[in-house]
Amino acid sequence: MRSQLNIRMASVVRIFCYFILLLMMAGCEAPLDLEGVKQVSQMPVKRFDRFQSIAKHGDVLVVAGFGGTVMVSTDGAKQWTRHELPDAPDLLEVEVCPDGTFAILDSRRKIWISTNGGSSWDVKDIDTQDAVTSLTCGPDDRLWVGGSYTTLLGSSDQGDTWDMTTLDEDAMITDIQFVDEQFGVAVGEFGMVITSNDGGETWELLSNIPNDFYPHAVLFIDRDNGYVVGLNGKVLSTADGGVSWDYQVSGTEAPLYGLARQGDAIIAVGEAGEMLQLSGDQWQRVAHGMPVRSYLRAVLPIDDQSLLIAGGAGALFVVAAQN
């Protein structure tokens, strides 16, 4: 009996000593410093941001990304204001119309509209059952959305109503551009090229880009001359309005996602922080000097001297134009 009592007493003593040790450790532990976490949380750009597209009108820059992230700057990308749209939608592309209306394509078949420089956004449904993938705004302020099954939708009232055209091909539109009020071009899966010469009233399917090329971005300088970029660093150019295409030597095998023009130079950005510039007839890599940990998706001139670049892992920075 005494032996069992001694065992119980010993157990109580061990437990008591254990709790005393915990109290001593807690008393010696330094206070948890959350100031660094607080400072990071207050920064407008997050390391997990996945930016997809940039648009500019006057002094206003708007950047859109996944998770409902919208960044707005009114001072040339020196300072940013962060907006997070309700329900954290994946935002695929932002465009601006000549009248200053910003539009953002939502993967959930919605369009977000801002008429006050990105300060607030109204959401509207896009009347389609097809997936939506690409967005542009023409010189006549008409919005255009491309999607699956070669679907093209146009809206002249900021997304309130939509007119639909389809070529009934099982291919996804990946990018759209209107060069002027009449000439538009759309590219898609399997090297598909579609053009319009009447402001989008009708669309014509041209011969495909060779080798089932998958174009991520298209950029036409005028009705005749244009470029497409895609996987494996592939760049092609046309001098006849998309009827025929020629491969160009890019010097990289990284997938390329975005195109822009600054002066006479063409800029391309892509995976692993890749950035290229075409001056004359030669593509050259640009050493932008930024520690990019993911892809670069979008590029847009801020002015004659600088470019805004955006992509994954919070990549959002300005680089000087290359001479």
Image: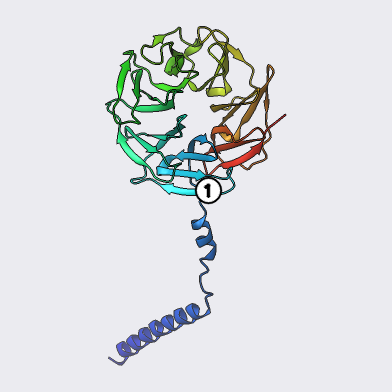
The residue nearer to you, when weighing 271 against 96, is: 96
Side of 265 relative to 59 (left or right): right
Q: Residue farthest to the right?
A: 323
Side of 174 relative to 293 (left or right): left
Question: Mark 1 Cα within 10 Å, few/some/many (few <14, many 20+)?
Answer: some
What coloring was used for the rendering?
Answer: rainbow
Q: Against 210, is 164 above or below?
A: below
What element does badge 1 sit on? loop
Residue 140: x and y, percent? Answer: 43, 23
What quarter of the picture does the N terminus occupy?
bottom left
Picture quadrant of residue 238: top right
Residue 85: x and y, percent? Answer: 38, 45
Residue 24: x and y, percent? Answer: 49, 82
Residue type marked 1: Trp
Q: Residue farthest to the front?
A: 99
Q: Count of labels shown?
A: 1
The residue nearer to you, when weighing 252 against 2, is: 252
The residue depicted at 43 percent of the width and 48 percent of the height is 83
Q: Against 96, is 33 above or below?
A: below
The residue depicted at 32 percent of the width and 16 percent of the height is 165
What quarter of the picture does the C terminus occupy?
top right
Q: Residue farthest to the bottom?
A: 2
The residue depicted at 35 percent of the width and 20 percent of the height is 152
The residue depicted at 58 percent of the width and 35 percent of the height is 272
Residue 250: x and y, percent? Answer: 63, 21
Q: Which residue is mark 1?
A: 80
Side of 34 relative to 9 (left or right): right
Q: Against 229, is 15 above or below?
A: below
